[in-house]
Each structure stands twice: as C-alpha cells, then as structure tokens.
Image (cartoon, rainbow, N blue to C red):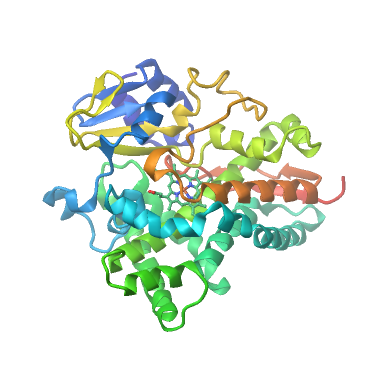
Amino acid sequence: MEAEQIVGALMTPKGRGDPYPLYAAARELGPVRRVKDLPMHLCTGYAEINAVLRDNAFGKLEFDRLPEEWRSLIAEDGAMESFSRSVLEMNPPNHRRVRSLMSSAFTQRRVAGLEPAIVRMTEGLLDELAALGEGGRPVDFMENFAFRLPVNVICELLGVPEEDRYRFRPLAHDLTFVLELTENFDDFGPADAAAVQLRAYFTELAERRRAEPQDDLVSALVQVNDAHDGRLSDAELLGNLLLLLVAGFETTTNLLGNGLYLGFEHPEVLDLVRKGEISVAAYVEEVLRHDSPVQLTSRIAVSEDARIGGHHVPPGEQVMLLIGAANRDPARFENPDVFDPTRSDNVPLSFGAGIHYCLGQGLARLEGKIAFEMLLERFPVMELAAQPERRDRLVLRGYQTLPITVSSAA
Ligand code: HEM
C-alpha cells in the first residue's frame, strides 16, 4: 500500500475502527514517508516521532499564520478558532507565555493534593455503579464511570459547579471532531455549534468568577486576563478553558474504557493485577501504549532545514505523527502487538513529548491508577454484558458504550 492509500484508508470507518493494520502497512514504507501529491509526510517510527516533537524546526500551524483563503473558511468563534487560541496550537514565544500561566495548576504537588478528592469521587461513582448494576443488570461503564470520574475531576479544578458537569459529554464529543482527519471543513458544523455553546457557558462562568473569585482555575485565569498586561487575551482565556475541559476528560475517559476492555480481553493479566503481581501503574502504562487514547498529532516544518533523520521536510509541509504506530514500533518495543504490562522500559509516546508534553499527564495517570485499583477491589467479578461500540474516531480513540455487569461477591 502507498502512503496516500493509507491516509485515505485511515479516513474510513473501517480504518478508524482498527487503524493498527494500516500503521503496520505504513511502517513497511519506512519510519517516515512523503505522501504523493500532498504537502504531507507520514511518520510511524518511535525515535523519529520523539525527535520531531522535541525539535523546534517543527511547530504548530498557528491561526494567525494561516493563509487568508483558509482563514475565511473557518467559522468565527468556532471550534478550530477556539483550539487555535489555546496553548495546544501555539508556538514559542506565545506558547511559553500561556503554558507557564497554566502549569502552576498542574505541579506534582497540586496533583498529589487532589488524590483524596479523586478517591472520594471514585467511591461515590462505584456506589452508583453497584446500585445501577444490582442483580446483574447491565450498566454502561462509559457513561456511568469512565466519563463521570474525569469530568468531575477537571470540573473541580476549573470550578465548574456540579450540576453543570454531565452536559459536557456530547458537547466535547462534537467539539473534538476538529482534531480528526477530514477533507472537508463543512463537516465542522456540529463542532462549531458545540464551541458556541461552550464559549457561552465559560463566558458566563468567567463573569461570575470575576465578580466573586473562588479558589479555582477559572478565577485564577480570569485574574490574569483582567490585568490587561498582555499575558492572556480574552480569546486565549476562552480557548484555554475549552481546551482544559475537553483535554481533561475526553482522553482520560478513553484511557479508562480502553483499559477495562483490554482487561476483558486478557483476564489472565487482570487476575495478576488483582493479586498484586502486576502493579496498577504498570497496567495503566501498558494500556496507554497498546491502545493510546490519542492516536496522532501533527506538526509543520517552520524552518528551512527541518529534517527527520535524512528526510527533508520543506517549510510549511505537514508531518502526521502516528503516536499509535510509534507505540507499536518493533524497533522500540519487543513483541509490540502483545499486551504485556510486565514489559520493561515502557515509555509510550501517548502524552507526546517536548514543549507540548501533556500538561495533565500526572493527573491522568493518577486518575487511572485510583480508578482501576478501586474498581478491581470493589467488584471481584466484572463481565462484558454485550459487544461495546467504538466511537467512530481516529485521533481520540475510545468507546461510546461498554456494557458490563458487576458483582461485589467473589
Ligand atoms: C490519558 C489521558 C491523556 C492523554 C493520552 C493526553 C495526551 C496528550 C497529548 C498527546 C498531548 C500533546 C499534543 C501535541 O503534542 O500536539 C497533550 C497535550 C495537552 N494535554 Fe493531555 N492527555 C491526557 C490527559 C490530559 C488531562 C487530564 C489534561 C488536563 C487536566 C490534559 C491537558 C493537556 C493540555 C493543556 C495539553 C496542551 C499542552 C501544550 O500544548 O503545551 N491532558 N495531551
């Protein structure tokens, strides 16, 4: 298969459903390959992707640098523009300025301090799961646990009131469609509509916190915005609040769902985790590697001499970085298709690398650890109640539904 056929196939429901054979086909072409007739390069190698993410010859396609004819296609205040005003889509020096404002909320100490709250929330959700699943009634793990835990955690940090939290699942799902590979900006209608709703919500919440500040992230960012000293513009305030909300739960929801499903596929591994012979942290790390919640990101060459090894990428051309492929690169991982939490030196690229390295990785890992520890302890028996349904997404990979039965009796 040629690179352009692989890109085409990754944009079909079948390719999104199981991209791993396509990654393997891409790897046959070498760790990096130009896509014919497109200003695009496909990168599958672990070492190569790791290097590009850390190389300032590559950067993001910043909104203000987009060609005018593209910008005119992008809805004003829509999803693309929102993301583009966030730290995720910025290059230095703007990136440094905004990231430093946000990092103080995610220091190791701050994250560790959240542990008791995460344990408390998990306990509450497990009680609800037990009640819903009483007598062997099937319950949807995605809706009732995998979504609820991370959305509560990030909303607690941001300062979003409890009664507002559960409305965000469909909105985030629509919004994050802009991260997908698509040939057609017309597909962004629902994403833009979600952005409008979320921006209205956060504009109103920011107003409330402006009037009455609390000890939360929205209040902290509003104060920086109010200083009017160039550290955080109005558009950046909203763009980053939206990013934090969706980055804070969509991915972690998928980590929990992908992780539980892998447990059903590998009951012998789950038994070893229950017995304490495999640590939950190692299990979470292997879930991240084997079925990464974020499958790809991209960069463009921002310098004349952007190179990946000997491969030259002309300025303005895009490199599609297949994280899901890097995590299964046989040059980096032995038997990469095998799910094996006991593998040594397991450092997947699921949280990226370099200046955009995931700000929430410590929090996501902590949530994963607490969730699986407490789930396994609370329910000695968990079974798949029906075939799960995958989300029809490539970039943010996870399940829409995962029906299970739970039992507290061993
Ligand atoms: C399993 C869960 C998660 C995964 C797999 C994940 C993955 C990633 C990846 C791959 C990137 C880098 C994207 C790139 O280089 O283009 C990233 C960036 C980011 N993530 Fe996460 N993430 C997760 C959880 C979280 C959480 C819980 C939060 C917030 C509480 C968060 C906030 C962010 C932010 C703000 C960025 C942008 C950082 C920057 O551009 O400097 N993520 N994440």
Q: Relative to the observer, which residue lies in front, 352 or 163?
A: 352
Residue 126 image-quadrant placement: bottom right
Whether residue 400 can be seen here: no
Percent x, y for residue 145?
64, 55
Specify whether 275 is left or right of 87.
Answer: right
Specify whether 161 is left or right of 43.
Answer: right
Percent x, y for residue 117?
66, 62
Percent x, y for residue 338?
61, 23
Percent x, y for residue 102?
42, 58
Residue at figure coordinates x 40%, y 37% from the top left: 296
Task: Check the picture and name the quadrant holding the N terminus.
Answer: top left
Residue sitting farthest toward the right: 410
Count of numbered circles in the view: 0
Please say if 402 is above or below 202. above
Whether residue 266 can be seen here: yes
Residue 56 image-quadrant placement: top left
Residue sitting farthest toward the left: 68
Specify whether 254 is left or right of 43.
Answer: right
Residue at figure coordinates x 53%, y 60% from the top left: 154
Residue at figure coordinates x 48%, y 17% from the top left: 331
Residue at figure coordinates x 60%, y 36% from the top left: 285
Task: Check the picture and name the quadrant holding the C terminus.
Answer: top right
Q: Relative to the observer, which residue lies in front, 20 or 289?
A: 289
Residue sitting farthest toward the bottom: 211
Please say if 301 is above or below 392. above
Q: Relative to the observer, which residue lies in front, 340 or 74?
A: 340
Specify whether 311 is left or right of 6.
Answer: left
